[in-house]
Amino acid sequence: MTVNIQSKEVLARLLATENISVEHRNVGTASFDVKNRNLVLPLWDDMQNFTYDHLVGHEVGHALYTDADMWGSAIQKHGKNFKGFYNIVEDARIEKKIQRVYPGLKTSFVKSYKKMLADGFFGKSEDEINNFKLIDRINVYFKCGLSTPVDFAKDEKKWLDIISKIETQEEAEKVALELFKLAQEELEQEQQAQKELEEEMEDGSDDNDFDFDDDDMGDDDYSDTEDGNDSFEESDEEGETESVGRSVSESEDDSDKKEEITAQGISDNISAGSSTSLDPNAPIAITEEALENNIQQEYSQETDSNIVNMYLNLNAKYHEDIIWDYKKVLSCARSDTISAGTKMYKDFQRNNKKTINYLVKEFEMKKKAAEYKRATVSKTGVIDTLKMNNHKFSDDIFKKMTIVPNGKNHGLVMFIDWSGSMASQLSNTVDQLINLVSFCRQVQIPFQVYAFSDNDKGSKYDRESPDISQFKTGETLHGDNYHLLQFFDDKMSRREFQEMCALTLAVGKYWENRYRFDHRYGTYSVDYKLWLSGTPLNDAIISAHHLVAKFKKMKRLDIVNTVFLTDGEGFYTHYKNDNGARTYIGYGIDKLIIQNPVNKKQYRINSDTKRGYGGISSGAVTRNLIKSLREHTNSNVIGFHILPNRKPSAISALPKSLDYTQKERVFAEMKAHKFATITTNGYTKQFTVLGNDLQTSNGAIDVSETATTAQIRTAFKKANKGKKESRVMLSKFIDLVA
């Protein structure tokens, strides 16, 4: 029977009445991490729906009713052997409570345990169950009591009544400890009896000086087994000696596996208790071990071995450590760089200031128009004395009040590609950027601007690589050299803002000058820490989850517009694999589940078979990370994709999700309007722009000396329109926030 995995994930969240994390992994059995609220379900072959429902219901029971700290503290205090006893009693409690709330689960529990019992999952056949120790018969009784009879002595039945009435975890721990101590006493008595028998044998052997023949030893008293071990038969101590053999020898045989054993229901991730091996001299709940091991042997198959869950819950401190704030960036500025940049900024202001002011006024008009459109008029209930004379033929004699609802508070966070491939377009990009932040500063919209880079000259002397041990298996890892350069912040002083404008203009022109030297500003150099390098786009998107959410909360914003500007796809994303090592997502992975640990949403990616060799493409990871960012921060995520100017290269660089006809349409739209819009790439909106169209227009009027007044007017309108349209980022941002 085929199980709908995603429906079981939804079921788990509904039962838990909270948005828990649900993962499907190649594990032997289900488990729930009570502390981190994470339910792990196995990918089993031959799985029945009722078995899955049983697993989900059981683990959700732990999610609802088991306290992680109390659990870990108890195991830490009483030892790992106590864990099996504790789990048996706790399982009985939480299964009773979850079935009480969701009675429909009872059928699934009965069917599932009945099948496990019939298949020998508890270590013995149904006929042999009554040979179990008390704790193991209790385990079978509360899990399978409706399916099979379990025998108890008269004095043992009291425990059934006690456990069935347990409601709190404190009570479960207390009862489990009493059972554990009782089993400990019984085991010590058996071990003492065994010791006395061994000593008696040794004494008898000494008296005979090992000089006896076969006639002196009856078969009923002693026999030599095939494997050389001694055993007693048909003695008055028969039941006890069998128990001793099961408790001691079996635990010794399994000593190599102790660290791998996880009690069903609770993950070993919970606090302490998993740090030590089981003690062979302490009682063991054998059915707990048998159930776990048999489930793994029966069902644990490599059904979907390539699924990798990638987590986005990166350490907050790590995010902060990778940022160079604007003060630190300014400290990298050389005097010759600032000198040249200051000249550039004066030219920039001369060419752009009037246009920005015009757009500010346009923005204010659009905002007022939007407010007027939302305005409502209501009657106050107070009579307007000026209208009293109309009361005979009109009911409209009351004063009215116009209500203008407040607009939403917007903010801007921008991430710029600081890679080598951006060099030829970096100067134009910086012009667009300064237009945008100047506008935001003038209309008092909060903003932050970062450039993402993996320039090793800028990072390796500044911070150590993160300690991989602080991350969980499957969590994403930033590249060793990844960092963010903060160029702008709304809290900058006027001097700092102007100095940063000068610096970024100079750096942008520097890389442009490597191809086309501009003698107007003289020669200068750029600090190596600000050099261009690779494209860690996915790393930046992951960082944005933390940074944008923090920015939105700090500035008390309703909407944040998060902008990514890049000329291509980023590198492969790294993560911590099962071996505790760093590796990257790429070839050899058929399915990938990106899981956001905050909102618990999952984003599933299949292998890109169109490429001919399978694996997960970096672009697919990027698209889904963008979706996660949108839902994580509830923000508009806007993309600006800078394309090569030549048509063949531009067509090739467009998203693979578009067919050739669609790409032709996008290119034609770019040529006509200086940009095109794409909505299929994960972003709220993505604008594609040809590199040449990033250049801002100065609004020069091109007319002949003999031009008529009408021709001059037309040329003037065209020039002003060009000034506005050439500032594509600013224009689109205004449309969003107005």
Image: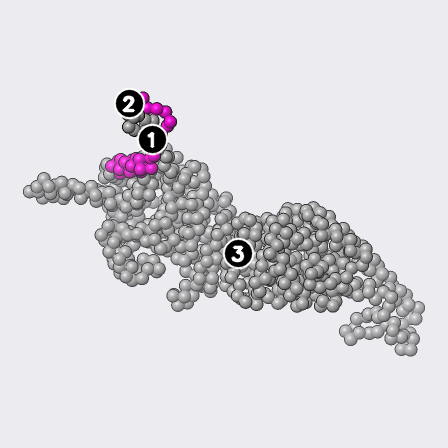
Which residues, given as a range, are shown in magenta? Answer: 356-385
> Which residue is under mark 2?
389
Q: Is residue 102 magenta?
A: no
Q: Position of residue 404 (x, y in %)?
A: 35, 33
The residue drawn where x is 31% and y is 62% is 659
**Residue under the image location 55 percent in, 49 percent down:** 17
Mark 3, mark 2: which one is toward the viewer? 2
Give the x, y percent position of residue 489. 38, 38
Decide: is 663 above or below 210.
Answer: above
Tell me if mark 1 has few (under 14), some (14-19) or many (20+) residues whose alpha carbon lies within 10 angstroms of its own.
few
Mark 3 vs 2, N-terminal side = 3
Secondary structure of the residue carrying numbered label 2: helix
Q: Is residue 362 magenta?
A: yes
SS for callout 1: strand
Name the residue that disc number 1 marks: 402
| Colour convention | one colour
What secondary structure prevails in the magenta region?
helix
Residue 89 image point, x, y percent: 70, 53
* Residue at left offset 77%, top offset 61%: 151
Extreme-top residue of the structure? 385
Depicted 725 relative to depicted 301: above or below: above
Q: Earlier in the sequence, mark 3 or mark 1?
A: 3
Dot 2, crowdedness within 10 Å: few (<14), some or many (≥20)?
few
Question: Residue 127's x, y, as percent?
Answer: 74, 68
Task: Name the residue that disc number 3 marks.
Answer: 9
The reply, left or right, for residue 583 in relation to residue 185 is: left
Is 281 or 382 nearer to us in this picture? 382
Q: CA distance from mark 3 to mark 2?
A: 69 Å
Which residue type carries mark 1?
Answer: Thr
Question: Label 2 amino acid?
Answer: Asn
